[in-house]
Amino acid sequence: MGKTIAEKILSRASGGKEVKAGDFVTAKVDLHYVLEGGFVEVHKKVVEGGLPNGLPKLANPDALAIMLGDHRGCHTKPADAEIYKQSRELAHRYGISELHETNTGIAHAAVPEEGMARPGMLVCGKDSHSTTAGAVNAFATPVSAVETAWTYLTGELWFRVPETIKFVCNGKLQDGVDAKDVFLYIIGKYTPSMAQYNSVEWKGPLIDTMGMDGRLTLACHSIELGAKCAPFEPDAKCLEYVASTPRGKEAFWPTSADLDAVYDQTYEEDFSSLEPQVALPHGFDVVKPVSELEGLKIDQCNLGSCANSRYDDLAIAARIVKGRKLKARMIFAPGTWKIYRRAIETGVIATLVDAGVMVMAPTCDLCAGGAAALTDGERAVGATTRNFKGRYGSPNAEIYLASPATAAASAVMGKITDPRKLL
C-alpha cells in the first residue's frame, strides 16, 4: 500500500519504521524555530514549572533557530526591547547559534528563503503559520510552548500520523487571479474546519505551473483549513528554489507521495473561470466573488504578512497602481530584506511609492495590528493572513480579506474593485 508525503517524512524522522495514518510515533525534529520572544516564553514556563535554573541542557542546539525581527523588528517599547535582550542572552547561554536578528524579516518567509527548511525535513515552529514551509516539501507544523520545551530538551516530539487530504487543482488562472483566490474559494466552499489535523497535498496542473510564491501562500493558509501540515511535491521548480538558497547544498530528502497512496479525501476543482474572491468580516465562513462586493467603500489596504509579502505579490500590485494615484490608504511591508532589495532593483518599490503606497520595513505588524491599525467604523481590504475582529486594531472596524491584486485595485479606486479591470 502506497504512502503519502506526511507518512513518508514521519517514517524517516522516526528512524525508518513503517508508519501509516493513525499511528503514534516519536520523531526527531530537523528544525525548530521560534519567533520573537518565543524562547523567553518557553523559558518562563519551564521556570514556573519547577526548574528554577531553566532547562539542564539542549539536546540538539544546532537544530534550533530564534527568529527575531519578525513582529517587532524595530521595537518601539522598552518591554519589546527587553524581550529581545533576553532572547539574545538565552541563545548565548544555551549555545543556539541560529539567532537571526537583522537582514531577515518575517520568520515564515525567511525560513524557506534561507534554505533552513528543505525537502523531507520535519520542521516545527512556535506559531500557527509554520505550515508555510510545506511549500518546499517539508512536514512543517506549528507546536505549543510546552512542545517546544520538550523538543529543546529531547530533540524529539511525538506525533499522531495525520490522514491526508488531496486537492487536485486543474485549469489556468486568469491574469489578476492568484493563489490567494484559490485558497479563499476552497475555504469558502469547504469550510475552515474541513482539514482538521490532516496533511493537505496541493496537486494538479495548476499547482505544477504555479510559482513558489503562490505555493508558499497556499501552504501558509492551509492552517486556516485546520491542517496539521501542507507538504508539496518536490518537483523541479521546488528543487531549483531550494538549490538557490544559502543552504541548498545541505542535507535534505525529496519526498513524493506514492501513486497508490491512500487519501482520506480527494477534492478536484477547475479554476479556469475563477474570479477574484473576498472573505467577509470576521473570518473565513463567508467568501464571495468580488463581483458581489464591488463598489463597497474602503479606507485602507494592508498588503504583507507571511501569506502575501513576496515578490510576486508586490509585482502584481505595482502593475495595477503604476501611473495611478490611490484613493484609499495602502501600506505594504515586504516579507524579507531580500524581497525588499529585489523589489528595489526591479523598480517595483519606486512604482508603489510613486502611486502613494507607504512602504514599511519587513514586519508582521501590518497583519497583527501593530502598525497601520484601523479605528472605529473604518473598513479595509487586507492581503494578509486573517480578518478576525480586532485584527487590525479596533474591534469595530471591518477587514475584507483578498489577494494583493484585489487590494491594490481597491486602493486605486477607493472601493472594492475587480483587479482584472485595471490590468
Image: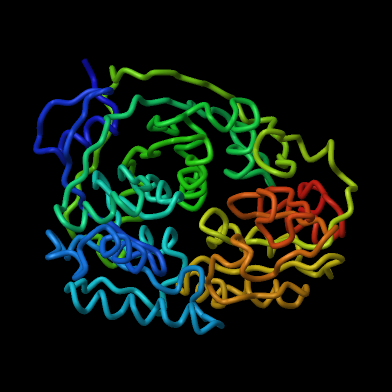
In the visual, does 299 lie left or right of 258? right
In the visual, does 153 lie left or right of 408? left
- Front position in the image: 333 or 35: 35
Up/down of 188 relative to 327, above or below: above
Residue 50: quadrant of the picture: bottom left
**Does the image show residue 240?**
no
Q: Look at 48% across and 41% down and name the residue there.
A: 223
Give the image location of residue 236, x and y in percent: 33, 45
Give the image location of residue 186, x and y in percent: 59, 31
Quarter holding the N terminus is top left
Q: Look at 71% across and 35% down and name the residue there.
A: 287
Give the image location of residue 401, x and y in percent: 69, 48
Give the image location of residue 116, x and y in percent: 29, 60
- Front position in the image: 238 or 357: 357
Q: Look at 51% across and 48% down and name the residue there.
A: 217
In the visual, does 347 lie left or right of 168? right
Up/down of 280 relative to 168, above or below: below
**Does the image show residue 98?**
yes
Q: Look at 50% across and 21% down and name the residue there.
A: 267
Up/down of 309 relative to 336, above or below: above
- Front position in the image: 309 or 95: 95
Residue 283: quadrant of the picture: top right
In the visual, does 353 lie left or right of 59? right
Residue 180: quadrant of the picture: top right
